Image: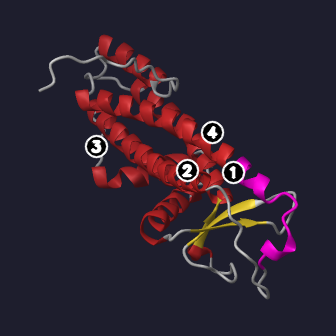
Amino acid sequence: MIEKWVHIECIFNNKWGLKIINEINKAVKEGRMESPSDTFYDYSMSIAIRLDLIGRLLQRLSRHFSEIEKYIVDVKDEYIFTQSKDGFALRIDEELKLDLLIDIDAFLFEVNSCCELLGQYMYELYSALGISISKENIGITQAKILKEKKINTSWFRKLDESRNFFIHNAAPYIAIDVTKNESKNLIIMKENLKNFTDQRKYITITTLVEIREGFRSSLPIFQEHLIDCVRSASR
């Protein structure tokens, strides 16, 4: 039985949602809304944790890819595959390869988890404001908010497809696109591909960047929307 323990200090760098909390406190004090549930504040903490995790994962992925790029500087022709010619597989550090795959999986998982938490966070705040919405429709509401601000929502689909691909389908096979020497791209394949005409069978680092940028651009939009909702409370 645990009888003694030491808590590790846990201070999060990401301050997303702090302005929302400040507006809520003001509205509750003025009697314009009820205080949100404890669950709402639990979601707020969970989102802050995941935003810090995502930031850290992006740093690690960037570092891993930079390390892999070093292996293909002046790579010999015998290691280059084309649609008409097979090459030899290039051996890289095993720990580097595994760390890369772990962090891609973690990145997709955490962004997906954070999106789900944001939905639950919004639902709890809507409930406190007396805004009627079903949990099943919160994703539709999120997409509508972004579209009204002219934000491209295609990254939602790419996140869903990439997450399912990586969990359920990927072997995974790893390659580097060296078609253009100045813009190399990491490829994660479902199978040992001979061509890349079917985009359902692979994802690239570019896909992950598009998910990252879509996610980043959405956060301030959601925050602005929720602040407006709280400021409009009149009960």
Q: Nearer the viewer, mark 3 or mark 2?
A: 2
Sequence-earlier tag: 2 or 1: 1
Q: Of the residues shown, which amino acid type is indicated by label 4? A: Gln
Label 1: which secondary element: helix
Residues packed near mark 3 inside 10 Å, few (<14), some (14 to 19) or many (20 plus)? few
Q: Of the residues shown, which amino acid type is indicated by label 1? A: Phe
Q: Please tell me the numbered disc located at residue 65.
A: 1
Which stretch appears magenta? 66-81
Would you name the residue on which mark 2 appears? 99
Residue 37 visible from this viewpoint: no
Q: Gap in Å between the C-alphas at discs 2 and 1?
A: 11 Å
Which residue is pictured at 77% across the width and 57% down the height?
71
Would you name the residue on which mark 4 appears? 59
Q: Nearer the viewer, mark 2 or mark 1?
A: 2
Residue 231 visible from this viewpoint: yes
**Left or right: where does residue 145 sit relative to residue 37?**
right
Q: Gap in Å between the C-alphas at discs 3 and 4?
A: 40 Å
Sequence-earlier tag: 4 or 1: 4
Q: Please tell me the numbered disc located at residue 25.
A: none
Q: Cβ–Cβ below 8 Å for labels 3 and 4?
A: no
Task: Tell me: residue 205, above or below residue 221.
Answer: below
Sequence-earlier tag: 4 or 2: 4
